[in-house]
């Protein structure tokens, strides 16, 4: 049982197409389609001539008595109007999530309830600001005293002391880096 691959190839001398038995086949690099199926091309070794895959005939789907005709499928039977919704409001609540954060249309009762909740939160914030603990009272008194004193001013003695500390720190840093003796 010898199975051979026969390919129709054009004869280089005469140019006529004739069937040729192929001895060796080389497969090209395997590529994967978007659906994940592997694809490759068959080629005749030495000639680099691509051997096409056999054509697959499309499947025929027979018509049955129970099939819906194409003309019936494409006929427009529903015409929406602006006067009445296409479905009852209870069905819309089932299709759209009532509790979604992305929902933009709400009932009036729901909006009133949410506004009352926001007003209660704001009232609570205002009442918390008005309440003061003894510690808050002491801190407020201290702040007013400090504001009354104003900003402090540096005296020349203070500035001289700050300059001396900076010079000492700079000298110690230069000594640690090995630059103190070279620049002095």
Image: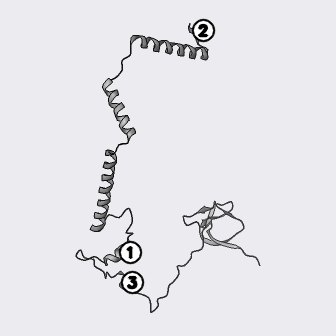
Q: Residue furthest left?
A: 83
Q: Nearer the viewer, mark 3 or mark 1?
A: 1
Q: Nearer the viewer, mark 3 or mark 2?
A: 2
Cα separation, mark 1 vs mark 2, equals: 85 Å
Pointer 3: residues within 10 angstroms few (<14), some, or many (20+)? few
Tell me if label 3 and label 2 are in contact, CB under 8 Å.
Answer: no
Q: Secondary structure at mark 2?
A: helix
The quarter of the picture where residue 70 lies is: bottom left
Front one among 95 and 20: 95
Q: Residue furthest right?
A: 1
Pointer 1: residues within 10 angstroms few (<14), some, or many (20+)? few
Residue position marked by numbered label 1 in the rendering: 94
Residue position marked by numbered label 3 in the rendering: 70
Determine whether 30 is above or below 81 in the image. Answer: above
The quarter of the picture where residue 112 lies is: bottom left
Which mark is first along the chain, 1 or 3?
3
Q: Secondary structure at mark 1?
A: helix
Picture coordinates of residue 53, whole percent (x, y): 60, 71
What's the residue at 31%, 45% (across, down)? 130
Picture coordinates of residue 164, whole percent (x, y): 49, 12
Lateral position of residue 87 relative to residue 168, left or right: left
Picture coordinates of residue 81, whole percent (x, y): 25, 76
Residue position marked by numbered label 2 in the rendering: 181
What's the residue at 61%, 66% (across, down)? 38
What's the residue at 55%, 67% (across, down)? 35
């Amino acid at each position: 049982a010898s199975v051979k691959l026969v390919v129709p190839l054009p004869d280089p001398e005469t140019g006529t197409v004739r069937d040729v038995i192929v001895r060796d086949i080389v497969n090209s690099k395997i590529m994967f389609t978007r659906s994940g199926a592997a694809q490759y091309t068959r080629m005749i070794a030495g000639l680099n001539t691509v051997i096409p895959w056999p054509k697959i005939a499309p499947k025929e789907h027979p018509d049955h008595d129970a099939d819906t005709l194409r003309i019936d499928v494409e006929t427009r039977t529903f015409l929406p109007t602006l006067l009445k919704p296409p479905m009852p409001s209870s069905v819309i609540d089932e299709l759209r999530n009532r509790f979604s954060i992305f929902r933009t249309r709400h009932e009036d009762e729901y909006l009133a309830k949410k506004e009352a909740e926001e007003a209660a939160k704001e009232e609570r914030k205002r009442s918390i600001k008005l309440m003061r603990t003894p510690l808050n009272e002491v801190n407020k008194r201290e702040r007013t005293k400090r504001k009354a004193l104003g900003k402090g001013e540096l005296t020349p003695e203070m500035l001289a002391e700050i300059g001396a500390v900076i010079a000492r720190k700079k000298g110690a840093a230069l000594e640690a880096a090995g630059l103190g003796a070279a620049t002095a």
